[in-house]
Amino acid sequence: MTLRLAEHNKDDRERRLAEIRQSLGSRSIVLIGLMGAGKTAVGRRLANWLDLPFIDADSEIEAAAAQSIKEIFAEHGEAYFREGERKVIARLLDGGPQVLATGGGAYMNPRTRAAIKARGISIWLKADLRVLLKRVGRRDHRPLLAVGDPEAVMKKLMAERGPIYAGADITVESRDVPHDVIVGAVADALAAELGCEAASGGSAKETPQRRKKVQ
Ligand code: S3P
């Protein structure tokens, strides 16, 4: 996709980012997608560009439980983790505007999806299997990938979750390129989604990621 933000001069870019921020009101920008999609890395940079707080839901869950996710899974099981995840995200969504990165399974919960719809703009960072496996291979803190073959697990999750993730307001391909390139694509898609016409050089309507106009 085109990277209009990268092409703009600094003033245009700042104006455009300010327009996104303003149109956002108190809503959160919520990043969803599989493990390794780049939600935290992209989210952190996007927050920096937009001068908004960045919140990582997994870290907040760990802080609330005073345990790592790995420990929560091991001691209490996945169902307990999921309920905690739902509650923490519901609370965090009251704190917008912000950029909120969620764990890969969070959006699968219908109540969490409804809460995000009500108080946020969802962005699916969609990555292919090769990219995801390359990224998750670097660390071993993810309980779902600790048992069995990571490739098989990831394929299964892609098949199960892909159709649900596809309901996000915005979809951006998370490719194996520098994170700032993806952040630029996300900002372009956000400008289009939010109807920042002037700031997008009048071409917001042409952005393929545009799904529906925010009311
Ligand atoms: C999970 C993804 C993880 C974390 C937990 C479960 C999942 O977050 O929430 O290990 O179900 O996909 P990341 O997507 O940030 O790795």
Image (cartoon, rainbow, N blue to C red):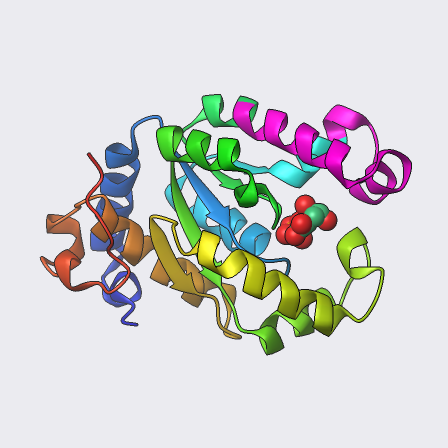
Residue extending furthest right? 75
Residue 21 lies left or right of residue 60; in this view the side is left
Using the rendered image of the protein, determine whether residue 35 is visible from the camera's viewpoint: yes
Using the rendered image of the protein, determine whether residue 37 is visible from the camera's viewpoint: no
Q: Residue 35: give x, y in percent of width and height.
A: 64, 58
Give the main secondary structure, helix, strand or loop, of the magenta stretch: helix
Residue 166 lies left or right of residue 21; in this view the side is right
Q: Which residue is drawn at 62% across and 27% down?
A: 88
Q: In which quarter of the image is the N terminus?
A: bottom left
Foreground: 49 or 135?
Answer: 135
Q: Residue 185: give x, y in percent of width and height.
A: 35, 62
Foreground: 178 or 8?
Answer: 178
Residue 72 lies left or right of residue 22; in this view the side is right
Residue extending furthest bottom? 130
Q: Which residue is drawn at 53% across and 43% down?
A: 107
Q: Quadrant of the C terminus?
A: top left
Quarter-of-image position of residue 64: top right
Q: Residue 210: give x, y in percent of width and height.
A: 24, 56
Q: Residue at x 12, y 49 (%)?
A: 197
Asked if residue 97 is positioned above or below residue 180 in the image, the reply reads: above
> What segment carries the magenta color?
63-90
Q: Is residue 75 magenta?
A: yes
Q: Which residue is drawn at 85% across and 61% down?
A: 147
Q: Does the magenta stretch include residue 64?
A: yes
Q: Residue 67: give x, y in percent of width and height.
A: 84, 33
